[in-house]
Amino acid sequence: MDLQVRSFSFSLNKIPGHINVHSTIVNIPIDAHHGADESNQPEAERSNAHISDEPVADVDQWMDLEEEDGSEHQHNVDNIQTEYHPNSGIPAQTRTFSTFQRDLLQDPPTPDVQPWVPFRCRLDFEVAELAHEAALSQPQIERLIDLLHRSKQEPFSLCNYKDIRNMWSAISHRLTPFQKRTIRVPYNGVDQEFTLYYWDLRDWACDLLRDPYLGPQFTFNAQHLSKFDGNTFVIFIDEPWTADAFWEAQSAMPSHAKPLAFILYADKTKLSSFGREKGYPVIARVGGGRVVAWLPIVKDDPSRSGKQKFADFKAVVWHESFKRILMCLRSKRKCGGWVEYWDELQRLMFPIVPILSADYEEQCIMSLIRGVMGKFPCPICLVPRAELHNLLETWPLRTRHDAVHLLRKARRKYTKEKREKKLKSQSLRDVKNSLNLSKLLDVFRALCFDHLHTHHEGLWGKHLWIKLQKCVNEVGRHAATKIDEGFAAVPRWRNLNHFKEVMGVSFADGTKHEDILKLILFVAHDVLDPETHESGYLLLQYMFAALEVHTTQTLKYISESECESKSWDFPKYHLGVHLFDDIKAKGVTRNFNTKPNEKVHRPLKKYYQLRTNFKQVADQILRADHWSLVSAWIRYRINDLDAYNARKEASDLDDSDSDDEVLNAPGLESSFHIKLGSSHLEDPAFHQFHTKLNRFLNMIPVIARNGHVALELSANIVTEFRYLKANFESMVDFRTSTDYLRCSPMFHNAPRYDSVIIRTKDGIIFGRLIFIFTCLVEGTSHPMALIQPCDAPIQHRPSKDRLLGLCEFIFTESIIRGALLLEDRSQPGDFLVVDSIDTDMFLRMKLHKDSHVY
């Protein structure tokens, strides 16, 4: 039986992808895949192989920037054109794809020789750093210091816990510290006081801009990027500065000014296991993200909860707090402010907040609408609650001007009833919005589609997944067991949760919901019959679309599959209609997804458990967070100093060596595409391996000198590896991505042999890694692999014979990237390509389906 590689797309129809390779892979010359199709291959896939245990370098370090003439007749396919904002004064540039780079290439600054000051020496800092990271108690720190005093290898001047604390306090002022303010809001005629902790956003941004390591990484000019497809330049969008909002903001500024964009996120989080202690962090992103504020939480009172007056009071507390946080930016929004950069030059900067990242509940507070029970529950448009299911209609967008005008008109009414009636016409609250600031922030334009809570934890996790579980349980216990067994049989994959069972478990984690969604189609397609379980099968058939976006057709089928009593008039069903506008204005969804921001909650919870006395915890958590930031800031500079000294020593050593003393030890040519690691001794089971390898190598003209030299291999020239990093050009954003592939008989107590996509003379095939190795031939080391191709027949033969008899040799440079293959239980011997592991794989399989090549 021939193995088949098939891929699912939007429908469940199986796609036969028989890969007929008439000439075996073992006959490929070492540069065979540089043949006729070389022009269509990504640069990273045509690189030579290389063994290294070092981390992968940035692809831009391998590219020399090369300006193109720019004339139309010289454009080649895949050329990238960068059009800068007119105010930047930079002319448009066209580069070949291989020379296009996004990061600034420049020599790193000379590091500070004493980055640990005011710690008296490096050892003092590293001990304090260790004590902080380990969250040692005071007695533990005292004991550590006592032990270190016994060592006289390096001066050590810290005396006790108080000394360490004083050092942290002294160095904390190197970076902008947090401030503490009291917010007063009246309720029933009595002022209520709340404590707000916050950082000055402008001072924090200035810290980053003055940093010689971080400052050069900023992008200040809006850009339009486009890629030449053979006929014309096609615009593509990824980062915020390539989208419309950034371009429009810079157009509204003086020509010599630059926008300084902030992304803000806010949400409550449970600090304790049972949720009794909560925190309310605000996270800002300019480059990286950090906690910039800790909002007060109004405690719920059973006697007041649920009342409109109390809900308005909590909204006032929130917006008064945010008013204080944004105060440092409000004064600069009209005329801007001069900022000194890392190069000691001053530039005029205008702050903007183009993105507010939040879940639906938080968006209701930001936009001051009345939530899911209001007449118009969408924070972006004025869709009536009864029309949330209708995705074909276009509704008026909310605007800052209309909201301010309506609030003013409502407050002119003499009675509360008339005032409320006026505000309810757009589901607004009687509260002044602190986020409606001209030239700085328009809350209704800054709010974004939240992929995590809308799809993974919302529409999928709380609706479709529950419905699918119900359909499977109606089939019978055997169906649920089969799905659990299918999930358990899925091969392990990096950054993909592995499940032993899913049908009897309730998941609250959005990441786990996302991974179940990625796999459910491939595991459950043979469980639900299209004739006897029409509702569940129809739901499953269109499940894949939920990974990225729902279309009107998708949602129509989902609606038809649901029971009549289910109402789809809820906001998270509707919010997807604004997704494409958000992408066009603000870039791809990762720019405003709440998922990376919610990851910042984890260290805050750790600080609560290990660094507080569980009383008045906000001050203690924020102090620990600030110390961690300062510690990381110093550690980066120490590491850079060590690397600088190492490079200097190596340079001095090279200068002292003469040309005839250069080592010619056998090694590998420098490569970026493939890197191997984790070498191991050869498995005795492969004692016939060398004979077959010797026969293969003698078939390669480049190695065997066109057959004039017969090669004889010995056992000591083959080195096994069990770890491979494959770098490839992503078809999504044209950047370098990496697959970490394993080929090991025991990896975390289980065998793991990953699958790969391989380029051959005759096209693309899939194969399973069996053995990764290097072969030393006449002083040259060749990275190679033994694979089980997916077009080879399966026979009932011993494992070793099957491996040696049916597997084929390839050079690792022919590996394009990794692949996740799942055996189809309905047709043993056939495999399904899980094209939902990432968007690059999805695009490759779609292109493979359409053209059978890519």
Image (cartoon, rainbow, N blue to C red):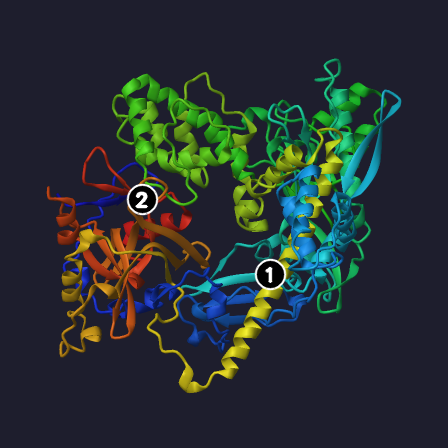
Q: Are marks 1 and 2 in contact (CB under 8 Å)?
A: no
The residue labelled by disc 2 is 746
> As shown in the figure, which amino acid type bears the numbered disc 1?
Asn
Where residue 731 sits, quadrant-wise, is: bottom left
> As shown in the figure, which amino acid type bears the numbered disc 2?
Met
Determine whether, in the image, residue 656 is placed left or right of residue 597. left
Where residue 408 sits, quadrant-wise, is: top right
The residue labelled by disc 1 is 639
Residue depicted at x 38% and y 20%? 470
The answer to whether one can see residue 125 in this image is yes
Residue 760: mark: none
- On the image, the x and y values in percent for residue 244 come to 60, 54
Determine whether, in the image, residue 184 is placed left or right of residue 203. right
- On the image, the x and y values in percent for residue 181 come to 83, 38
Where residue 555 sits, quadrant-wise, is: top left
Circle 2: is it few (<14), some (14-19), or many (20+) Cα within 10 Å? Answer: few
Of residues 620 and 33, which is closer to you in this image? 620
Residue depicted at x 70% and y 34%? 612
